[in-house]
């Protein structure tokens, strides 16, 4: 009887303690354990985000998603974060957090069961209620953590896709601005390669990193960067010509030759020299270049070489002119253009002067290489009067003796003009919107032998009349005026005159071709006014 009373009292006391425990301690323990588990799961999620986004170590990768490698991309560059990697990181973080969530919750229930239910260190009368309380806290914490993690993932998804949209809109806007700038510079149809004459929509750029030399085909804003892109070697490269991509080495995607240093930075002017073999194109081009640089040295508009190749070739041509020699004929293979920068500020432009071998103007199949004609709006036709048989035959023996006809062009100028204009039309060159400067070469010889008669060498109309009356090229002159919007005729002597200055006849031609275009053929100056 006494034992029964003791048991009853103990049972009543145990129940009373349980009631107090349930009323007072249990809510605190449940809330505390749930918050502890919730905090632990959120901390794990934060570790996952840091590991996936920042550390990128193998511990934060999953087998079903192979590691990202820039060498697998079409471009040798890392993708811009919000053009793929952000979505991949979101997916990876979701899977890793879900895996840690399952393991953490399972481990918590397992350890609680073992410690308080299966193999308690104290009496089960005390451990079982506490264990069940912890179970309640773990369940509540798991539910609370799942809700919070779901909200965090939803926020992550929204941020990623909003950022993706903003980045892509920004990249598209910058590309549109870049196109608008190119259109304002009349480069929207392409930039001229000085090596192969192709129109290049956008150069290939070479990474300047030490030992890298990887080539980026489209460096503009897009999936590999907005303002900057990161090469596979780690070097950051500008994505716009406006932000400095012109400082990189530009490569033509067609011939893999080097583009001019200022390609895309300024407007381009293409000036083709057209004429038969030995007509004097190379010598005239050298004289025009020398005129431009001499004028810049006397306070005229600035002129500088656009690449090292032009600088080297110019020095040779200048030396040949100075010693009154004859430059070697242009090689039949396509030569690189002579490129220079003229002017300053907004009027600054990149000028390509193309001197192509005269043999290419004779055979129609050879003129297909003259692709620069599509973008040219001013042409220089070099006409050698000594190449006209009727003119030579009309000279007296004394006049013929004073002229070295071995230097004359063997090609009829009418044949050259007809073939070249056919090619330009076939290549969609708009001749009706183009200008033509007809440079009658060897003026020094004509003047010395008094072969001009009463015709004025400084007047376009008088020069044209000399071609018609003396050379009998009336049909050619009329054909030129029918094909082109504007035609001007010049007598030119590509020789060095007094004080090592280019003959004054080159100045008006250069001014009309590369200057304001307002030369009226009746004035001759000693200075080029490039505007």
Image (cartoon, rainbow, N blue to C red):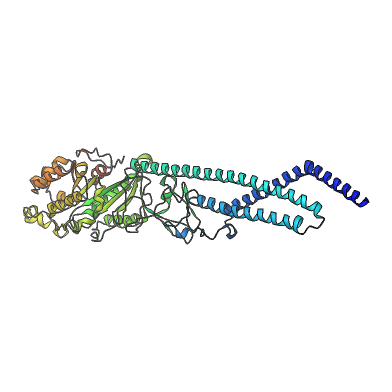
- Residue 101 in percent (x, y) is at 63, 52
Q: Is residue 235 visible?
A: yes
Count the marks: how many? 0
Q: Looking at the picture, tell me which residue is in the foreground, 205 or 508.
A: 205
- Residue 51 in percent (x, y) is at 60, 54
> Residue at the right extreme?
2
Q: Looking at the picture, tell me which residue is in the foreground, 442 or 359.
A: 359
Q: Quick check: 181 above or below 255?
A: above
Residue at (29%, 42%) from the top-left corner? 528
- Residue 370 in percent (x, y) is at 23, 54
Quadrant assignment, res 171: top left
Quarter of the image that includes the C terminus: top left
Residue at (46%, 60%) from the top-left corner? 71
Q: Is residue 502 visible?
A: no
Does residue 69 appear left or right of residue 450 in this picture? Answer: right
Quadrant assignment, res 216: bottom left
Quadrant assignment, res 487: top left
Does residue 510 appear left or right of residue 92 in this picture? Answer: left
């Amino acid at each position: 009887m006494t034992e029964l009373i003791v048991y009853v009292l103990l049972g009543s006391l145990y129940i009373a303690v349980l009631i107090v425990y349930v009323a007072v301690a249990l809510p605190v323990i449940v809330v505390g354990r749930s918050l502890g588990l919730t905090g632990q799961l959120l901390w794990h999620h934060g570790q996952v985000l840091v590991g996936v986004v920042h550390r990128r170590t193998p511990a934060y990768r999953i087998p079903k998603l192979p590691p990202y490698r820039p060498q697998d991309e079409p471009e040798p560059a890392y993708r811009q974060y919000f053009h793929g990697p952000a979505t991949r990181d979101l997916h990876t973080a979701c899977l890793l957090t879900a895996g840690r969530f399952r393991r953490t919750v399972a481990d918590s229930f397992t350890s609680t069961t073992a410690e308080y239910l299966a193999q308690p260190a104290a009496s089960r009368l005390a451990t079982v209620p506490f264990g069940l309380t912890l179970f309640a806290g773990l369940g509540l914490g798991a539910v609370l953590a799942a809700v919070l993690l779901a909200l965090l993932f939803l926020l992550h998804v929204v941020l990623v896709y909003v950022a993706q949209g903003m980045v892509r809109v920004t990249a598209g806007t910058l590309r549109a601005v870049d196109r608008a700038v190119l259109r304002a510079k009349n480069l929207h149809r392409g930039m001229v390669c000085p090596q192969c004459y192709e129109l290049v929509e956008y150069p290939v750029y070479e990474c300047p990193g030490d030992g890298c030399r990887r080539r980026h085909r489209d460096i503009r804003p897009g999936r590999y960067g907005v303002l900057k892109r990161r090469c596979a070697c780690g070097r950051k490269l500008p994505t716009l010509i406006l932000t400095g991509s012109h400082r990189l080495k530009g490569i033509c995607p067609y011939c893999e030759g080097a583009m001019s240093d200022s390609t895309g930075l300024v407007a381009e002017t293409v000036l083709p020299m057209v004429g038969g073999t030995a007509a004097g194109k190379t010598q005239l081009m050298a004289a025009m270049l020398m005129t431009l640089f001499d004028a810049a040295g006397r306070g005229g508009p600035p002129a500088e070489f656009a690449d090292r190749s032009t600088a080297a070739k110019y020095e040779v041509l200048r030396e040949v002119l100075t010693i009154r020699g004859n430059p070697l004929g242009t090689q039949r293979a396509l030569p690189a253009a002579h490129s220079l920068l003229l002017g300053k500020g907004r009027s600054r432009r990149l000028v390509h002067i193309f001197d192509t071998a005269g043999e290419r103007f004779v055979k129609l199949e050879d003129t297909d290489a003259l692709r620069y004609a599509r973008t040219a709006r001013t042409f220089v036709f070099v006409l050698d009067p000594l190449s006209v048989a009727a003119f030579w035959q009309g000279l007296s023996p004394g006049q013929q003796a004073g002229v070295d006809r071995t230097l004359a062009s063997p090609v009829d100028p009418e044949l050259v003009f007809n073939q070249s204009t056919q090619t330009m039309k076939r290549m969609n060159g708009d001749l009706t919107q183009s200008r033509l400067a007809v440079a009658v070469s060897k003026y020094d010889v004509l003047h010395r032998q008094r072969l001009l008669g009463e015709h004025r060498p400084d007047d376009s109309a008088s020069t044209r009349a000399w071609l018609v009356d003396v050379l009998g090229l009336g049909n050619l002159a009329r054909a030129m005026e029918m094909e082109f919007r504007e035609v001007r005729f010049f007598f030119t002597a590509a020789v060095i005159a007094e004080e090592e200055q280019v003959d004054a006849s080159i100045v008006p031609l250069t001014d009309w071709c590369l200057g304001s275009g307002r030369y009226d053929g009746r004035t001759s100056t000693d200075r080029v006014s490039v505007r």
